[in-house]
Image: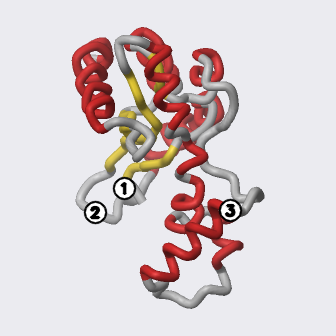
Amino acid sequence: KGIGVAMFSFSDPAKLKPLVDTYKANIRNAEPVGEFVYDKIMAIAPMFCLPDGEEARSLYDAGNASHIRGHFSVYFDTIPQYAERLKHIPRPIPQTKLRQLIREAFKDPNVKGPVATGAIEPEFLYRNGICVGDPDEVTRIVARYRDIGLDQLVFIPATGWHIPHEKTLESIAVTGEKVLPRFR
């Protein structure tokens, strides 16, 4: 339809390459629903970048992806594995019910989060496209997305009650000062 693509990327960026290649090969044949074909493809990935990569990994691990699995499994019910869990609940879902569902999901060991879990080490993060570490490490990971042909990468800065707000702001600043200029 010529409207471009936006997707979450919570695994190895190499897994996206066949999809990116297929999109790029076929977008030129789009019959646009608007005035023009928008031929860009973008992914969204987690990010936490500090001058000290060990500190970045430690803080990210403290507030890691397992803390978002409850929210993700309720609010992203268009993902088949999550939709199945919630298909019996009438829509719209009241806020009090949403909070109850999130609490239940946090307690359910069968609910998996969207972000790869494992030892928060540089190679694990690199392999899974999780942009966490020092500026050189994050640059190396971001380059993987560029190298598969993505046009844009949007970061989800690591935030939450486990990470001091000042550190999230520092991460955004360090990324802007030390990582992004390498991709101009």
Q: Which one is earlier in the sequence, the residue at label 3 or at label 1?
A: 1
Amino acid type, label 3: Lys
> CB under 8 Å between callouts 2 and 1?
yes
In the depicted structure, whether residue 50 falls above or below residue 106: above
Q: Quadrant of the C terminus?
A: top left
Please say which color scheme the image uses: secondary structure
Callout 3: 10 Å neighbours few (<14), some, many (20+)? few
Of tags 2 and 1, which is closer to the observer?
A: 1
Marks 3 and 1 sit apart, C-alpha to C-alpha, by 39 Å
Task: Say the numbered circle drawn on residue 15.
Answer: none
The amino acid pointed to by label 2 is Gly
Report whether 138 appears left or right of 68: left
Image position, residue 30 (x, y; %) = 43, 54
Q: Which residue lies furthest to the bottom in this view?
A: 90
**Eye-nearest disc, 3 or 2:** 3
Question: Taking 137 as reference, is 126 left or right?
Answer: right
Discs 3/1, front: 3
Q: Give the residue at x 39% y 50%.
A: 4
Give the mark, 2 or 1, whose residue is nearer the N terminus: 1
Residue that badge 2 annotates: 34
The numbered mark at residue 3 is: 1
Which quarter of the figure is the N terminus placed in?
bottom left
Determine the residue positioned at 64% across, 77% down: 86
Is the residue 35 above or below the residue 87 in the image?
Answer: above
Residue 72, quarter of picture: bottom right
- SS at mark 1 in the image: strand
Q: How far apart are marks 2 and 1 (CA)?
A: 8 Å
* Quarter assignment of residue 33: bottom left
Q: Decide: marks 3, 1 in contact (CB < 8 A)?
A: no
Residue underneath mark 3:
107
- Label 3 SS: helix
Q: Residue at x 40, y 12 (%)?
A: 52
